[in-house]
Image: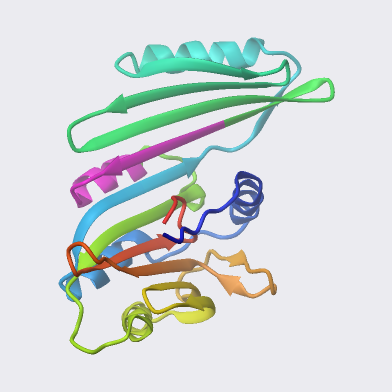
């Protein structure tokens, strides 16, 4: 089965660029959720990914202090440390519930005589909750560092091609396709929605802030839909 995967290096460079542009006035995730609801698509999972601003330190003391603060603040998380030689340290904290899971990743990268300190937070739930979404976003500082992904399933229309359904979704979101891959049972589209101020550059240097993936599911005869803004941050 074909999968579309963003490499870590490309994703990190894209995220840095995305963090430099303006913040959208329209709520991207709520627009996606409302559009899916209008089409009677059933949301099976939604996720939020947040990248904190990059910091630098002359030593690992700052990194270890931040690690201690996180472990004190999130005592219910399960923590582990991984090292890649002496220049790459990753601290991961996880909390897995019945319907939701959270993850914090703190990374120290040695660059010359300094350490580059990175932190990310992710939240994934099987049940959509606007209250939970607003609670999370209210405690995060820079809203332009947010990435959203929504998974859903939809009953197909008789005799409608998957590419036509993708176009229907783009029309519902008022987005214009920029790049796309079309196969009989799989469609992937990068698009641009003008009312969302944030954007990323494509390979051809065009603007994009929406990704859409559709797949015909042979098991349940439904269409699997995944939508991300500005990019899909998970494998699909």
Q: Is residue 160 above or below residue 180?
A: below
Give x and y (percent) for residue 104. Answer: 44, 29
User: 85 left or right of 71?
Assistant: right
Question: In the rendered structure, does residue 123 fall within the stretch colored magenta?
Answer: yes
What residue is rendered at 41% in x and 22% in y?
Answer: 93
Give x and y (percent) for residue 64. Answer: 58, 11
Taking the view exactly as shown, the residue that stands out farthest to the right is 112
Q: Is residue 95 above or below residue 64?
A: below
Q: Is residue 180 above or below residue 139?
A: below
What residue is rendered at 46% in x and 49% in y?
Answer: 146
**Colour mode?**
rainbow
What residue is rendered at 17% in x and 64% in y?
Answer: 220
User: 62 left or right of 86?
Assistant: left
Residues in magenta?
A: 119-137
Give x and y (percent) for residue 227. Answer: 37, 63
Image quadrant containing the N terminus: bottom left
């Amino acid at each position: 089965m074909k999968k579309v995967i963003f490499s870590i290096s490309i994703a990190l460079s894209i995220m840095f660029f995305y963090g430099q542009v303006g913040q959208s006035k329209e709520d991207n995730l709520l627009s996606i959720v409302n559009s899916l609801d209008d089409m009677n698509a059933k949301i099976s999972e939604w996720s939020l990914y947040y990248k904190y601003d990059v910091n630098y330190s002359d030593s690992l003391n700052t990194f270890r202090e931040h690690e201690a603060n996180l472990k004190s603040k999130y005592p219910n998380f399960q923590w582990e440390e991984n090292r890649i030689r002496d220049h790459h340290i990753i601290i991961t904290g996880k909390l897995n519930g019945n319907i939701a899971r959270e993850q914090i990743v703190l990374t120290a990268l040695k660059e010359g005589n300094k350490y580059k300190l990175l932190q990310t937070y992710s939240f994934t739930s099987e049940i959509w909750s606007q209250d939970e979404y607003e609670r999370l976003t209210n405690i995060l500082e820079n809203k332009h560092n947010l990435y959203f992904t929504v998974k859903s399933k939809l009953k197909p229309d008789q005799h409608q091609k998957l590419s036509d359904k993708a176009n229907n979704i783009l029309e519902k979101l008022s987005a214009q396709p920029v790049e796309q891959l079309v196969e009989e049972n799989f469609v992937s589209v990068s698009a641009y929605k003008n009312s969302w101020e944030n954007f990323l550059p494509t390979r051809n240097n065009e603007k994009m802030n929406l990704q859409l993936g559709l797949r015909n599911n042979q098991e349940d005869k439904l269409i699997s839909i995944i939508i991300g803004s500005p990019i899909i941050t998970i494998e699909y």
